[in-house]
Amino acid sequence: MTPFRLRPAEPGDADFLVDALCQAVNWSPAWKPQSREKVLRNPDFNKYVADWPRPGDWGVVAEAPRPFGAAWLRLFPVDAPGYGFVAPDVPELTIGVLPGWRGRGVGTRLLTALFDGPYDRISLSVERANPARDLYVRLGFTVVDSGRDADTMVRSTSSTACCNCPRCSSSGDGYGRVRDRPAFDRPVRACRRS
């Protein structure tokens, strides 16, 4: 596998985050892909990248040496929620990896880096048919709400848990702490309680 590194997302990554958002929007090969321009014109999608970075935004980029994947968190207000909104103090995840890099553990590394970030809980929305849903479940996200085709999921990133699987993450308080930035290359932890 080609080596790659993770680094914090910066203001200069705004253009690539749009590319990553397009990958997230166009996850199904059965759909006609939406163009970058169409994604940016859609306010339901554009809100995930508009004015990057806003206060509270935080993310990571995978590169080798050019960016090919990104995962980021954004807070939304009650009156303008994202698809996976659960509360104004719980950021919503967006993740996108270019096709040639999928299935190589990049998503796991991106998400693991975010778990060490500044928030105690992370939410997301995922369609049930999306293969990424299996990754989210494997990494400890649990369903808190279900729609017709999609689930809203949440994961505690509490450091009191051994691995943040559903069993372990329930021991954390889920609110209030802001931790240091992540160790980008730490391995995914295995549950010590299983």
Image (tube, helix red, strand yellow):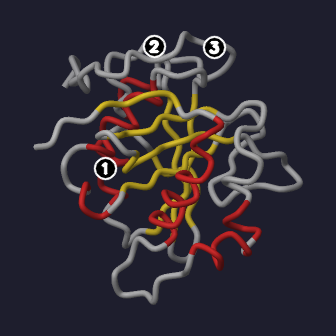
CB under 8 Å between discs 2 and 3 = no
Classify residue 91 as left or right of residue 43. Answer: left
State the separation of the CA atoms marked 2 and 3.
Answer: 11 Å
Q: Which corner quadrant of the image does residue 146 belong to?
A: bottom right
Q: Residue 122: x, y in percent?
A: 56, 37
Looking at the image, which residue is at 29% across and 21% down?
A: 185
Q: If the image is split into quadrants, where does the C terminus sit?
A: top left
Looking at the image, which residue is at 77% across and 46% down?
A: 76
| Amino acid type, mark 2 | Ser
Q: Residue 37: x, y in percent?
A: 65, 76
Q: Which corner quadrant of the image does residue 1 belong to?
A: top left
State the separation of the CA atoms marked 3 and 1.
Answer: 25 Å
Q: Residue 178 got which mark?
A: 3
Classify residue 87 as left or right of residue 71. Answer: right
Q: Residue 135 got which mark?
A: 1
Q: Nearer the viewer, residue 136 or 1?
A: 1
Residue at label 2?
159
Q: Residue 113: x, y in percent?
A: 41, 28
State which tag comes first along the sequence, 2 or 1.
Answer: 1
Badge 1 marks a residue whose secondary structure is helix
At label 1, counting other C-alpha atoms closer than 10 Å, the crowd grade (few under 14, some 14-19, many 20 or more) is some
| Amino acid type, mark 3 | Val
Badge 2 marks a residue whose secondary structure is loop
> Is the residue 63 above or below the residue 160 in the image?
below
Camera-nearest label, 2 or 3: 3
At label 3, counting other C-alpha atoms closer than 10 Å, the crowd grade (few under 14, some 14-19, many 20 or more) is few
| Amino acid type, mark 1 | Leu
